């Protein structure tokens, strides 16, 4: 999968969401988030994989050439990630640190932490094969983070940070593009729909686990149009022009399941708010019409109703 393409496109998407979010928060003083806590894959990994024996790393040029210092940091983008822009828009002066980095200590923990790992996802077995941090281990690190936070801030403030923070999860693309479609041990025994249902079960388990620790406001990205990723078009496009329709159809079916699961979980757990960010539609529109003057409007329109529901 082309990590840079996905990460940089999502940058525009989520930064639009962030601007909407903070403008609404100005009229609602109780809605500002004390921290950001991030889970997932390469779209939001800010350097955890730098500390792992994995091929999926971004600690070399051209990664980071447009970032502060013009050096690679482990972000799978030439500049800032979506989470960086979100943090800035919400008023943070620092980014939540990669949890495996030395920066994830002391007062730096007060603004949250980033547990994401490139090549991870809902399929823990695939993540382990890629020597990434599987989602269950990211949850264990989150529990460890809470213990450290209590030592730094005290139980009362730590509880406020844990329950008041915004939680972001980006996962699923690697599961399909880097595992299901290329692994005969998986795709010969499961249809894409069956595999997607397995991933949804893991998503639900993840939500239940982080809720038990204290997470209450969770934003999760849908699958993007995976059939439009350069790697997918090269590997699976054959003589098909443009995006690979089969992969995009699978992504849309998965997104329906994801929305249904999120809705069910929100009804089951008191105080839980989950927003599924539809990134498929605006990114597909951008791919189909890259010079379209209304691209930003398309992104904004798709998120207005979604982002506001996490406020408060």
Image: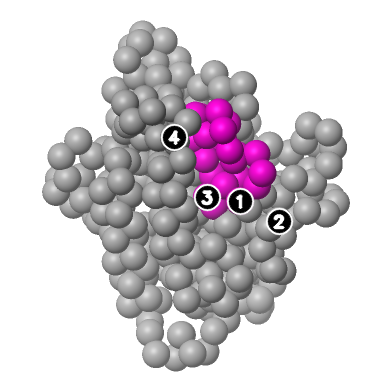
Number of the front mark, 4 or 3: 4
Image marks 2 and 3: residues in contact by CB distance under 8 Å: no
Which mark is on residue 100?
Answer: 1
**Which residues make up the magenta segment?**
96-116
Image marks 2 and 1: residues in contact by CB distance under 8 Å: yes
Q: Which residue is mark 3?
A: 115
Mark closer to the chain start, 2 or 3: 2
Which structural element holds mark 3? Answer: loop
Q: Quote the CA–CA distance across marks 3 and 1.
A: 8 Å
Q: Quadrant of the C terminus?
A: top left
In the image, 277 versus 40, the foreground residue is 40
Q: Quote the CA–CA distance across marks 2 and 1.
A: 9 Å
In the image, 186 versus 287, the foreground residue is 186
Q: Check disc 1: other Cα within 10 Å, few if <14, some if 14-19, many if 20+.
A: some
Rendered view: 274 above or below 58 = above
Q: Quote the CA–CA distance across marks 4 and 2.
A: 27 Å
In the image, 147 versus 130, the foreground residue is 147
Image marks 4 and 1: residues in contact by CB distance under 8 Å: no
Q: Which residue is mark 2?
A: 50
Number of the front mark, 4 or 1: 4
Number of the front mark, 3 or 1: 1
Which structural element holds mark 1? Answer: loop
Q: Which residue is mark 4?
A: 151
Q: Check disc 4: other Cα within 10 Å, few if <14, some if 14-19, many if 20+.
A: few
Q: x%, y% of residue 105? A: 58, 38
Q: Check disc 2: other Cα within 10 Å, few if <14, some if 14-19, many if 20+.
A: many
């Amino acid at each position: 999968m082309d990590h840079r393409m996905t990460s940089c496109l999502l940058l525009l998407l989520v930064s639009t969401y962030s601007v909407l979010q903070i403008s609404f928060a100005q009229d609602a003083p109780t809605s500002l988030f004390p921290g950001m806590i991030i889970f997932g894959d390469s779209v939001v990994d800010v350097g955890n994989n730098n500390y792992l024996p994995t091929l999926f790393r971004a600690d070399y040029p051209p990664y980071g050439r447009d970032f502060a210092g013009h050096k690679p940091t482990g972000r799978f983008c030439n500049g800032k990630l979506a989470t960086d822009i979100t943090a800035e828009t919400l008023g943070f002066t620092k980014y939540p640190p990669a949890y495996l980095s030395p920066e994830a200590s002391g007062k730096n923990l007060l603004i949250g932490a980033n547990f994401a790992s490139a090549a991870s996802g809902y399929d823990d077995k695939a993540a382990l094969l890629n020597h990434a941090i599987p989602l269950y281990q990211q949850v264990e690190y989150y529990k460890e983070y809470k213990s450290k936070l209590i030592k730094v801030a005290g139980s009362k403030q730590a509880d406020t940070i844990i329950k008041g923070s915004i939680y972001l999860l980006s996962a699923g693309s690697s599961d399909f593009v880097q595992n299901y479609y290329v692994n005969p041990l998986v795709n010969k025994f499961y249809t894409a729909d069956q595999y997607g249902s397995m991933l949804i079960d893991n998503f639900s388990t993840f939500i239940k686990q982080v809720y038990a620790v204290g997470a209450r406001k969770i934003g999760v990205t849908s699958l993007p149009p995976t059939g439009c990723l350069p790697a997918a078009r090269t590997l699976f496009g054959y003589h098909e022009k443009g995006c690979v329709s089969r992969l995009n159809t699978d992504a849309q079916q998965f997104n329906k399941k994801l929305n249904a699961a999120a809705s069910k979980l929100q009804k089951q757990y008191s105080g839980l708010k989950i927003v599924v960010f539809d990134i498929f539609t605006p990114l597909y529109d951008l791919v189909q019409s890259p010079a379209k003057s209304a691209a930003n409007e398309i992104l904004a329109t798709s998120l207005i109703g979604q982002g506001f529901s996490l406020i408060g």
